[in-house]
Amino acid sequence: MQSTIHFYGGAGLVTGSNFLLESGETKFLVDCGLFQSQHACEETNWSTFPYDPKTIQYLIVTHAHIDHIGRIPRLIKEGFKGKIISTEATKALAEPLLLDAIELLEREAHRCNREPLYGKEDIARALSLWEGISYHQKKDLRDGFELEFLDSGHILGSAMAWIKRGEKSIVFTGDLGGGNSPLLASCEDLPRVDYVVMESVYGDRLQPEKEHRREALEDIIEDTAARKGTLLIPAFSNERTQDLLYEIRNLMTEKRVPLQPVILDSPLAEKITQAFLKFPPYFSSEVRARVEKGENIFAFPQLQFASTVEDSRKADHIPSPKIIIAGSGMSNGGRVREHEMHVLPDANSTLLIVGFQVAGSLGRQLLEGLKKVTFDGNHIPVKCRVEAIYSYSAHMDGEELLEFVNKGAKSLQAVFVVMGEPSAAGTLVQRIRDFLGVRATAPELGEQATIEL
Protein backbone atom coordinates (compact mmCIF):
# COMPACT_ATOMS: atom_id res chain seq x y z
CA MET A 1 0.00 0.00 0.00
CA GLN A 2 1.07 3.57 -0.53
CA SER A 3 1.56 6.17 2.17
CA THR A 4 2.59 9.81 2.02
CA ILE A 5 5.04 11.67 4.25
CA HIS A 6 4.44 15.41 4.59
CA PHE A 7 7.37 17.50 5.84
CA TYR A 8 5.69 20.28 7.83
CA GLY A 9 8.60 21.15 10.13
CA GLY A 10 12.25 20.33 10.59
CA ALA A 11 12.79 20.39 6.80
CA GLY A 12 15.40 22.83 5.55
CA LEU A 13 16.04 23.90 9.16
CA VAL A 14 16.97 22.37 12.51
CA THR A 15 13.88 23.06 14.60
CA GLY A 16 10.10 22.70 14.42
CA SER A 17 10.08 18.92 13.92
CA ASN A 18 6.66 17.96 12.52
CA PHE A 19 5.99 15.15 10.07
CA LEU A 20 2.66 13.69 8.92
CA LEU A 21 2.43 10.07 7.77
CA GLU A 22 -0.81 9.55 5.88
CA SER A 23 -2.40 6.42 4.40
CA GLY A 24 -6.03 6.81 3.36
CA GLU A 25 -7.97 7.87 6.44
CA THR A 26 -5.09 6.94 8.74
CA LYS A 27 -2.97 9.91 9.84
CA PHE A 28 -0.04 9.88 12.28
CA LEU A 29 2.04 12.87 13.32
CA VAL A 30 5.63 12.44 14.43
CA ASP A 31 6.63 15.31 16.75
CA CYS A 32 5.08 18.75 16.97
CA GLY A 33 7.89 21.09 17.93
CA LEU A 34 8.50 24.79 18.29
CA PHE A 35 10.37 26.68 15.58
CA GLN A 36 13.34 28.32 17.30
CA SER A 37 15.66 31.11 16.19
CA GLN A 38 16.44 34.55 17.56
CA HIS A 39 12.91 34.98 18.87
CA ALA A 40 10.19 32.46 19.71
CA CYS A 41 7.62 34.85 18.23
CA GLU A 42 7.85 33.48 14.71
CA GLU A 43 4.91 33.46 12.33
CA THR A 44 5.38 29.71 11.89
CA ASN A 45 4.68 29.05 15.58
CA TRP A 46 1.41 30.98 15.57
CA SER A 47 0.18 30.08 12.08
CA THR A 48 -2.57 27.52 11.56
CA PHE A 49 -1.39 23.95 11.13
CA PRO A 50 -1.31 22.84 7.46
CA TYR A 51 -3.58 19.91 8.37
CA ASP A 52 -6.71 19.52 10.44
CA PRO A 53 -5.66 18.42 13.96
CA LYS A 54 -9.10 16.86 14.47
CA THR A 55 -8.34 14.24 11.80
CA ILE A 56 -5.06 13.01 13.36
CA GLN A 57 -5.38 9.71 15.24
CA TYR A 58 -1.89 9.53 16.80
CA LEU A 59 0.94 11.88 17.69
CA ILE A 60 4.20 9.98 18.18
CA VAL A 61 6.84 11.91 20.14
CA THR A 62 10.53 11.05 19.77
CA HIS A 63 11.90 13.01 22.74
CA ALA A 64 11.37 15.89 25.17
CA HIS A 65 13.15 18.80 23.54
CA ILE A 66 11.03 21.88 22.95
CA ASP A 67 11.69 21.87 19.20
CA HIS A 68 10.02 18.44 19.16
CA ILE A 69 7.19 18.99 21.70
CA GLY A 70 6.72 22.77 21.94
CA ARG A 71 3.54 23.06 19.84
CA ILE A 72 1.73 20.00 21.19
CA PRO A 73 -0.55 22.11 23.43
CA ARG A 74 -1.30 24.29 20.39
CA LEU A 75 -2.31 21.14 18.52
CA ILE A 76 -4.67 20.34 21.40
CA LYS A 77 -6.03 23.88 21.34
CA GLU A 78 -6.86 23.47 17.63
CA GLY A 79 -8.82 20.28 18.17
CA PHE A 80 -6.52 17.23 18.37
CA LYS A 81 -8.23 14.49 20.40
CA GLY A 82 -6.16 11.47 19.43
CA LYS A 83 -3.57 9.55 21.41
CA ILE A 84 -0.06 10.87 22.18
CA ILE A 85 2.62 8.18 22.54
CA SER A 86 6.22 8.41 23.76
CA THR A 87 8.51 6.65 26.21
CA GLU A 88 7.61 7.03 29.89
CA ALA A 89 10.63 9.25 30.54
CA THR A 90 9.74 11.55 27.65
CA LYS A 91 6.23 12.02 29.02
CA ALA A 92 7.59 12.80 32.50
CA LEU A 93 10.05 15.38 31.19
CA ALA A 94 7.56 17.00 28.81
CA GLU A 95 5.32 18.44 31.53
CA PRO A 96 7.91 20.70 33.27
CA LEU A 97 9.39 21.70 29.92
CA LEU A 98 6.04 22.77 28.48
CA LEU A 99 5.02 24.61 31.64
CA ASP A 100 8.34 26.45 31.61
CA ALA A 101 7.91 27.39 27.95
CA ILE A 102 4.65 29.19 28.70
CA GLU A 103 6.45 32.12 30.35
CA LEU A 104 8.73 32.75 27.38
CA LEU A 105 5.91 32.33 24.88
CA GLU A 106 3.63 34.69 26.82
CA ARG A 107 6.36 37.37 26.86
CA GLU A 108 6.93 36.90 23.14
CA ALA A 109 3.20 37.00 22.43
CA HIS A 110 2.87 40.28 24.35
CA ARG A 111 5.89 41.74 22.56
CA CYS A 112 4.45 40.81 19.17
CA ASN A 113 0.86 41.70 20.07
CA ARG A 114 -0.39 38.12 19.65
CA GLU A 115 -2.62 35.90 21.74
CA PRO A 116 -0.74 33.33 23.86
CA LEU A 117 0.23 30.25 21.89
CA TYR A 118 -1.46 28.03 24.47
CA GLY A 119 -2.34 27.86 28.16
CA LYS A 120 -1.82 25.53 31.10
CA GLU A 121 -5.20 23.95 30.44
CA ASP A 122 -3.98 22.85 27.00
CA ILE A 123 -0.92 21.21 28.58
CA ALA A 124 -3.15 19.40 31.08
CA ARG A 125 -5.38 18.12 28.26
CA ALA A 126 -2.33 16.98 26.31
CA LEU A 127 -1.04 14.99 29.29
CA SER A 128 -4.45 13.36 29.73
CA LEU A 129 -4.13 11.99 26.17
CA TRP A 130 -0.49 10.95 26.61
CA GLU A 131 0.64 7.33 27.01
CA GLY A 132 4.18 6.29 27.96
CA ILE A 133 5.58 2.97 26.78
CA SER A 134 8.97 1.25 27.08
CA TYR A 135 11.66 0.69 24.49
CA HIS A 136 10.86 -2.36 22.33
CA GLN A 137 7.27 -2.54 23.56
CA LYS A 138 5.19 -3.16 20.43
CA LYS A 139 2.12 -0.96 20.13
CA ASP A 140 -0.70 -1.68 17.66
CA LEU A 141 -2.01 1.51 16.15
CA ARG A 142 -4.64 1.15 13.42
CA ASP A 143 -5.05 -0.08 9.85
CA GLY A 144 -2.29 -2.67 10.35
CA PHE A 145 0.34 -0.20 11.60
CA GLU A 146 2.57 -1.07 14.55
CA LEU A 147 4.91 1.17 16.56
CA GLU A 148 8.10 0.24 18.38
CA PHE A 149 10.53 2.64 20.08
CA LEU A 150 14.30 2.14 19.80
CA ASP A 151 16.84 3.93 22.02
CA SER A 152 18.34 6.86 20.10
CA GLY A 153 20.88 7.73 22.84
CA HIS A 154 20.17 11.47 22.50
CA ILE A 155 18.61 12.44 25.85
CA LEU A 156 16.87 10.55 28.64
CA GLY A 157 13.99 8.60 27.08
CA SER A 158 14.75 9.68 23.51
CA ALA A 159 13.59 7.24 20.85
CA MET A 160 13.52 6.39 17.20
CA ALA A 161 9.96 5.69 16.08
CA TRP A 162 9.90 2.44 14.08
CA ILE A 163 6.55 2.22 12.27
CA LYS A 164 5.74 -1.07 10.54
CA ARG A 165 2.96 -2.39 8.34
CA GLY A 166 3.30 -5.88 6.93
CA GLU A 167 6.77 -6.38 5.49
CA LYS A 168 7.45 -2.64 5.07
CA SER A 169 8.66 -0.17 7.68
CA ILE A 170 10.01 3.32 8.27
CA VAL A 171 12.09 4.85 11.06
CA PHE A 172 11.77 8.46 12.16
CA THR A 173 15.03 8.94 14.03
CA GLY A 174 14.25 12.05 16.03
CA ASP A 175 17.69 13.24 17.15
CA LEU A 176 20.53 10.72 17.31
CA GLY A 177 23.06 10.63 20.13
CA GLY A 178 26.68 9.98 19.27
CA GLY A 179 27.55 8.30 22.56
CA ASN A 180 28.66 11.64 24.03
CA SER A 181 26.58 11.56 27.19
CA PRO A 182 28.33 10.08 30.24
CA LEU A 183 24.89 9.07 31.50
CA LEU A 184 23.20 7.24 28.63
CA ALA A 185 23.56 4.07 26.63
CA SER A 186 24.64 4.44 22.99
CA CYS A 187 22.18 4.76 20.13
CA GLU A 188 20.87 1.44 18.86
CA ASP A 189 21.72 0.38 15.32
CA LEU A 190 19.29 1.02 12.52
CA PRO A 191 17.17 -2.12 12.04
CA ARG A 192 16.24 -3.58 8.67
CA VAL A 193 13.88 -0.93 7.30
CA ASP A 194 12.80 0.45 3.95
CA TYR A 195 12.78 4.17 4.71
CA VAL A 196 14.43 6.55 7.16
CA VAL A 197 13.59 10.15 8.06
CA MET A 198 16.77 11.24 9.84
CA GLU A 199 18.37 14.22 11.51
CA SER A 200 21.44 16.04 10.15
CA VAL A 201 22.36 18.72 12.71
CA TYR A 202 26.08 17.96 12.36
CA GLY A 203 25.84 16.39 8.93
CA ASP A 204 28.66 18.54 7.54
CA ARG A 205 31.18 18.41 10.38
CA LEU A 206 33.14 16.21 12.72
CA GLN A 207 33.28 16.58 16.47
CA PRO A 208 36.62 16.56 18.27
CA GLU A 209 37.70 13.33 19.90
CA LYS A 210 35.15 12.47 22.58
CA GLU A 211 37.65 10.88 24.92
CA HIS A 212 39.30 14.29 25.42
CA ARG A 213 36.15 16.22 26.30
CA ARG A 214 36.50 15.68 30.04
CA GLU A 215 40.11 16.85 29.87
CA ALA A 216 39.02 19.91 27.90
CA LEU A 217 36.42 20.75 30.55
CA GLU A 218 39.01 20.21 33.26
CA ASP A 219 41.46 22.58 31.53
CA ILE A 220 38.86 25.33 31.14
CA ILE A 221 37.80 25.07 34.81
CA GLU A 222 41.44 25.19 35.95
CA ASP A 223 42.39 28.11 33.67
CA THR A 224 39.39 30.22 34.69
CA ALA A 225 39.96 29.48 38.38
CA ALA A 226 43.64 30.47 38.05
CA ARG A 227 42.52 33.87 36.72
CA LYS A 228 39.96 34.10 39.56
CA GLY A 229 37.21 34.46 37.01
CA THR A 230 33.70 33.10 36.56
CA LEU A 231 33.04 30.15 34.28
CA LEU A 232 29.55 30.70 32.83
CA ILE A 233 27.96 27.83 30.95
CA PRO A 234 24.67 28.49 29.12
CA ALA A 235 23.16 25.02 29.10
CA PHE A 236 19.94 23.36 28.06
CA SER A 237 17.96 22.32 31.12
CA ASN A 238 17.34 18.84 29.78
CA GLU A 239 20.34 16.47 29.49
CA ARG A 240 23.23 18.88 28.91
CA THR A 241 22.94 20.31 32.44
CA GLN A 242 22.80 16.83 33.95
CA ASP A 243 25.83 15.68 31.91
CA LEU A 244 27.79 18.70 33.15
CA LEU A 245 26.79 18.27 36.79
CA TYR A 246 27.85 14.63 36.63
CA GLU A 247 31.21 15.50 35.04
CA ILE A 248 31.96 18.43 37.38
CA ARG A 249 31.00 16.32 40.40
CA ASN A 250 33.47 13.65 39.30
CA LEU A 251 36.24 16.18 38.63
CA MET A 252 35.80 17.73 42.08
CA THR A 253 35.49 14.48 44.02
CA GLU A 254 38.62 13.21 42.25
CA LYS A 255 40.35 16.53 43.12
CA ARG A 256 41.23 17.17 39.49
CA VAL A 257 39.96 20.78 39.60
CA PRO A 258 39.94 23.43 42.34
CA LEU A 259 36.95 23.21 44.67
CA GLN A 260 34.67 26.21 44.11
CA PRO A 261 30.98 27.08 44.21
CA VAL A 262 28.90 25.57 41.39
CA ILE A 263 25.61 27.41 41.03
CA LEU A 264 22.81 25.82 39.03
CA ASP A 265 20.64 28.78 38.09
CA SER A 266 17.67 27.18 36.42
CA PRO A 267 14.58 26.09 38.35
CA LEU A 268 13.61 24.01 35.32
CA ALA A 269 16.97 22.24 35.26
CA GLU A 270 16.61 21.58 38.99
CA LYS A 271 13.24 19.88 38.38
CA ILE A 272 14.58 17.93 35.41
CA THR A 273 17.58 16.77 37.43
CA GLN A 274 15.31 15.36 40.12
CA ALA A 275 13.13 13.72 37.45
CA PHE A 276 16.17 11.98 35.95
CA LEU A 277 16.71 10.05 39.18
CA LYS A 278 13.23 8.51 38.87
CA PHE A 279 14.12 6.69 35.64
CA PRO A 280 17.21 4.54 36.23
CA PRO A 281 16.29 2.07 33.43
CA TYR A 282 17.04 4.80 30.89
CA PHE A 283 20.65 5.28 32.03
CA SER A 284 23.65 3.30 30.85
CA SER A 285 24.12 0.02 32.73
CA GLU A 286 26.99 1.44 34.82
CA VAL A 287 25.14 4.59 35.89
CA ARG A 288 21.88 2.67 36.38
CA ALA A 289 23.56 0.35 38.87
CA ARG A 290 24.80 3.30 40.91
CA VAL A 291 21.39 5.01 40.94
CA GLU A 292 19.60 1.80 41.89
CA LYS A 293 21.95 1.47 44.88
CA GLY A 294 20.71 4.85 46.09
CA GLU A 295 23.55 7.11 44.93
CA ASN A 296 22.59 10.65 43.94
CA ILE A 297 24.90 11.00 40.94
CA PHE A 298 24.33 14.77 40.76
CA ALA A 299 24.88 15.82 44.40
CA PHE A 300 28.14 17.22 45.81
CA PRO A 301 28.96 19.77 48.56
CA GLN A 302 29.93 22.62 46.22
CA LEU A 303 26.60 22.55 44.35
CA GLN A 304 24.09 25.32 45.07
CA PHE A 305 20.66 25.83 43.55
CA ALA A 306 19.49 29.34 42.66
CA SER A 307 15.81 28.60 43.06
CA THR A 308 14.57 32.20 43.23
CA VAL A 309 15.29 35.36 41.26
CA GLU A 310 16.98 36.77 44.37
CA ASP A 311 19.24 33.68 44.53
CA SER A 312 20.11 34.27 40.90
CA ARG A 313 21.13 37.88 41.53
CA LYS A 314 23.21 36.89 44.55
CA ALA A 315 25.14 34.38 42.43
CA ASP A 316 26.89 37.21 40.55
CA HIS A 317 28.24 38.54 43.85
CA ILE A 318 29.67 35.26 45.14
CA PRO A 319 33.47 35.69 45.02
CA SER A 320 35.19 34.05 42.08
CA PRO A 321 36.38 31.54 41.11
CA LYS A 322 32.98 29.99 40.61
CA ILE A 323 30.98 28.11 38.00
CA ILE A 324 27.48 29.16 36.98
CA ILE A 325 25.32 26.88 34.84
CA ALA A 326 22.24 28.74 33.65
CA GLY A 327 19.51 28.60 31.01
CA SER A 328 18.98 29.11 28.18
CA GLY A 329 21.33 27.00 26.10
CA MET A 330 21.55 29.44 23.19
CA SER A 331 21.63 32.62 25.34
CA ASN A 332 18.30 33.70 23.80
CA GLY A 333 16.70 34.47 27.13
CA GLY A 334 16.37 33.13 30.63
CA ARG A 335 18.59 33.80 33.62
CA VAL A 336 21.85 33.39 31.72
CA ARG A 337 21.34 36.87 30.27
CA GLU A 338 21.83 38.56 33.65
CA HIS A 339 25.01 36.61 34.29
CA GLU A 340 26.33 37.45 30.83
CA MET A 341 26.11 41.15 31.70
CA HIS A 342 28.74 40.46 34.40
CA VAL A 343 30.84 37.84 32.59
CA LEU A 344 31.08 39.13 29.00
CA PRO A 345 33.04 42.33 29.86
CA ASP A 346 35.38 40.50 32.29
CA ALA A 347 38.66 39.41 30.69
CA ASN A 348 39.30 36.96 33.53
CA SER A 349 36.07 35.06 32.97
CA THR A 350 35.01 32.44 30.43
CA LEU A 351 31.81 31.74 28.54
CA LEU A 352 31.70 28.05 27.63
CA ILE A 353 29.42 26.87 24.82
CA VAL A 354 28.59 23.16 25.02
CA GLY A 355 25.76 22.67 22.53
CA PHE A 356 24.50 23.45 19.05
CA GLN A 357 23.71 27.14 18.53
CA VAL A 358 21.05 27.81 15.92
CA ALA A 359 21.73 30.49 13.31
CA GLY A 360 20.80 33.95 14.63
CA SER A 361 21.01 33.03 18.31
CA LEU A 362 23.24 35.08 20.60
CA GLY A 363 25.28 31.99 21.39
CA ARG A 364 26.01 31.49 17.70
CA GLN A 365 26.97 35.16 17.28
CA LEU A 366 29.35 35.01 20.25
CA LEU A 367 31.01 31.92 18.80
CA GLU A 368 31.41 33.78 15.51
CA GLY A 369 33.29 36.62 17.24
CA LEU A 370 30.66 39.17 18.23
CA LYS A 371 32.46 42.04 20.04
CA LYS A 372 29.55 43.93 21.57
CA VAL A 373 26.18 42.87 22.99
CA THR A 374 23.16 45.05 23.71
CA PHE A 375 20.93 44.02 26.62
CA ASP A 376 17.98 46.27 27.47
CA GLY A 377 19.71 49.26 25.88
CA ASN A 378 23.03 48.57 27.63
CA HIS A 379 26.03 48.13 25.30
CA ILE A 380 28.34 45.49 26.75
CA PRO A 381 31.77 44.73 25.28
CA VAL A 382 32.76 41.09 24.93
CA LYS A 383 36.16 40.74 26.63
CA CYS A 384 35.82 37.33 28.26
CA ARG A 385 37.14 34.17 26.69
CA VAL A 386 34.55 32.36 24.57
CA GLU A 387 35.26 28.63 24.46
CA ALA A 388 33.40 25.67 22.99
CA ILE A 389 33.42 21.95 23.67
CA TYR A 390 31.34 20.40 20.91
CA SER A 391 31.99 16.84 22.01
CA TYR A 392 29.35 17.20 24.73
CA SER A 393 26.82 17.57 21.95
CA ALA A 394 23.94 15.14 22.12
CA HIS A 395 24.08 14.66 18.33
CA MET A 396 25.99 12.32 16.05
CA ASP A 397 28.53 14.03 13.80
CA GLY A 398 28.75 13.59 10.04
CA GLU A 399 30.82 10.39 10.13
CA GLU A 400 28.56 8.80 12.74
CA LEU A 401 25.43 9.69 10.78
CA LEU A 402 26.91 8.12 7.65
CA GLU A 403 27.86 4.96 9.57
CA PHE A 404 24.35 4.86 11.10
CA VAL A 405 22.86 4.70 7.59
CA ASN A 406 25.53 2.28 6.41
CA LYS A 407 24.46 -0.34 8.96
CA GLY A 408 21.00 -0.48 7.40
CA ALA A 409 21.96 0.35 3.82
CA LYS A 410 21.19 -3.08 2.28
CA SER A 411 17.44 -2.78 2.86
CA LEU A 412 17.00 0.96 2.42
CA GLN A 413 14.94 2.29 -0.48
CA ALA A 414 15.19 5.96 0.48
CA VAL A 415 16.59 8.29 3.15
CA PHE A 416 14.98 11.66 3.85
CA VAL A 417 17.46 14.00 5.52
CA VAL A 418 15.86 16.63 7.77
CA MET A 419 16.47 18.61 10.98
CA GLY A 420 19.64 20.32 9.82
CA GLU A 421 20.66 23.60 8.25
CA PRO A 422 20.72 23.36 4.42
CA SER A 423 24.51 22.97 4.22
CA ALA A 424 24.52 20.16 6.81
CA ALA A 425 21.59 18.31 5.26
CA GLY A 426 22.96 18.75 1.73
CA THR A 427 26.40 17.45 2.69
CA LEU A 428 24.94 14.36 4.35
CA VAL A 429 22.67 13.66 1.38
CA GLN A 430 25.61 13.77 -1.02
CA ARG A 431 27.75 11.52 1.17
CA ILE A 432 24.96 8.93 1.52
CA ARG A 433 24.58 8.88 -2.26
CA ASP A 434 28.29 8.82 -3.04
CA PHE A 435 29.58 6.43 -0.39
CA LEU A 436 26.60 4.14 0.19
CA GLY A 437 24.72 4.25 -3.10
CA VAL A 438 21.43 4.85 -1.27
CA ARG A 439 18.79 7.22 -2.63
CA ALA A 440 18.77 10.29 -0.37
CA THR A 441 17.03 13.65 -0.52
CA ALA A 442 16.70 16.73 1.69
CA PRO A 443 13.02 17.71 1.49
CA GLU A 444 12.05 21.35 1.76
CA LEU A 445 9.38 22.66 4.11
CA GLY A 446 5.93 21.68 2.83
CA GLU A 447 7.15 18.97 0.46
CA GLN A 448 5.76 15.45 0.44
CA ALA A 449 7.00 12.01 -0.58
CA THR A 450 5.13 8.84 -1.55
CA ILE A 451 6.41 5.55 -0.13
CA GLU A 452 5.33 1.91 -0.16
CA LEU A 453 4.06 1.29 3.35
Image (cartoon, rainbow, N blue to C red):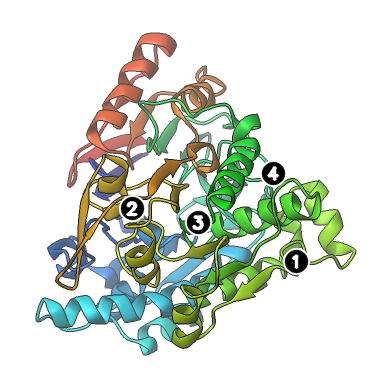
What is the residue that sits farthest to the right in this orientation?
Answer: 293
For marks 1 and 4, give the CA distance: 24 Å
Identify the disc placed on residue 229.
3
The reply to whether dot 2 and dot 1 touch (C-beta < 8 Å) is no
Quadrant holding the C terminus: top left
Q: Secondary structure at mark 2?
A: loop
Mark 2, other Cα within 10 Å: few <14 / some 14–19 / many ≥20: many
Query: Which quadrant would the N terminus be assigned to in this image?
Result: top left
Q: CA distance from mark 2 to mark 3?
A: 39 Å
Q: Which residue is mark 1?
A: 300
Tell me the amino acid under the disc marked 1.
Phe
Return the disc, 1 or 4, that comes first in the chain's sequence. Answer: 4
Q: Secondary structure at mark 3?
A: loop
Name the mark on residue 17. Answer: 2
Q: Residues within 10 Å of mark 1 (few under 14, many from 20)?
A: some
Q: Amino acid at mark 3?
A: Gly
Tell which tag, 2 or 3, sits nearer the viewer. 3
Tell me what residue is drawn at x 48 percent, y 29 percent. 207
For label 4, the residue is 185
